[in-house]
Image: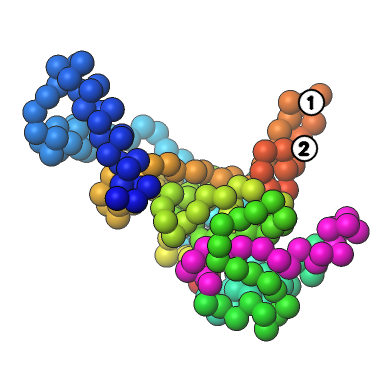
């Protein structure tokens, strides 16, 4: 049994104890079906009117959140686009000396020709010296310019939280209107919620000190989005 299976079993045991304490026993499938029916019967609250072109809306809102966005035509263009973005960064001399061209990527991008563009990118667990993380995402939310990440074996969280620079690949057909559609998509494709969902709206920031916004406080200093399609 792997780590994910262990986690699922432990979570199931905890929830079983909660159900017993609440005297809500019975068939788990029936309980879930009843809950799904309850949610489906309730209408959504007021929502903003969204344009027909969700991709353009997402790109605009992501830019509002201090992300940068470039549209490309295909997955094969990712290495060239990453190299182009890194070369254009105005980085401190100590970081520029490393060119920030060494980093990690999600397994789905391991087969791309990174070295042809001067990039040293590996699909492996991240370490402290890695300044760059290249990831996909589960979906993107047009209303807020937010990226949604669902944990799993092929989507390690560290690659999008720990590096100074995060490059996220978003496919146009994975842009949804709002949070409601994002959660519906998770349930439909995953059969339920994964261990964790992470919502990212631009670089990490804080305004705790004198209400001055500081980027990179709790995660990446910069988020660059490659929008395919």
User: Badge 2, how many Cα within 10 Å: few under 14, some, many 20+?
Assistant: some
Comes first in the chain, label 1 or label 2: 1
Along the horizontal axis of the image, is 145 left or right of 25? right
Outermost residue toward the bottom in this view: 116
Whether the magenta-drawn stretch holds residue 95 is answered as yes
Residue 77 in the image, given as x and y percentages of width and height:
59, 78
Along the horizontal axis of the image, is 205 left or right of 42? right
Instruction: Name the residue tied to disc 1.
Output: 209
Along the horizontal axis of the image, is 41 left or right of 113? left
Residue drawn at (14%, 35%) of the image: 28
Marks 1 and 2 in Cβ contact (< 8 Å) = yes
Along the horizontal axis of the image, is 91 left or right of 142? right
Instruction: Name the residue tied to disc 2.
Output: 214
Quadrant of the image occupied by residue 120: bottom right
Q: Is residue 111 above or below residue 37?
A: below
In this picture, which residue range is highlighted in magenta? 90-110
Residue 64 in the image, given as x and y percentages of width and height:
66, 48
Residue drawn at (72%, 43%) of the image: 216
Outermost residue toward the right in this view: 93
Return the residue nearer the eye: 55 or 102: 102
Whether the magenta-drawn stretch holds residue 97 is answered as yes
Quadrant of the image occupied by residue 219: top right
Residue drawn at (53%, 72%) of the image: 110
In what element is the residue under mark 2? strand
In what element is the residue under mark 1? loop
How far is the residue under mark 1 from the one under mark 2?
9 Å
Q: Is residue 26 above or below residue 47?
A: above
Residue 43 in the image, given as x and y percentages of width and height:
27, 34
């Amino acid at each position: 049994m792997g780590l994910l299976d262990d986690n699922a079993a432990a979570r199931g045991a905890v929830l079983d104890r909660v159900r017993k304490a609440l005297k809500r026993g019975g068939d788990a499938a029936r309980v879930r079906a009843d809950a799904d029916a309850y949610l489906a019967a309730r209408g959504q609250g007021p929502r903003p009117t969204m344009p027909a072109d969700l991709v353009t809306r997402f790109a605009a809102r992501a830019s509002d959140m201090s992300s940068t966005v470039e549209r490309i035509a295909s997955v094969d263009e990712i290495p060239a686009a990453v190299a182009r973005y890194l070369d254009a960064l105005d980085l401190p001399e100590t970081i520029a000396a490393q060119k920030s061209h060494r980093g990690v990527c999600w397994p789905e991008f391991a087969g791309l020709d990174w070295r042809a563009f001067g990039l040293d990118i590996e699909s492996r667990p991240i370490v402290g010296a890695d300044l760059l993380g290249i990831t996909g995402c589960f979906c993107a939310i047009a209303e807020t310019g937010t990226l949604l990440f669902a944990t799993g074996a092929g989507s390690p969280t560290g690659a999008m939280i720990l590096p100074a620079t995060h490059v996220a690949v978003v496919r146009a057909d994975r842009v949804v209107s709002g949070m409601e559609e994002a959660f519906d998509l998770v349930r439909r494709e995953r059969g339920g919620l994964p261990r964790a969902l992470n919502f990212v709206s631009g670089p990490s920031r804080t305004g705790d000190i004198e209400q001055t916004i500081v980027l990179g406080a709790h995660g990446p200093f910069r988020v660059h989005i490659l929008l395919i399609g």
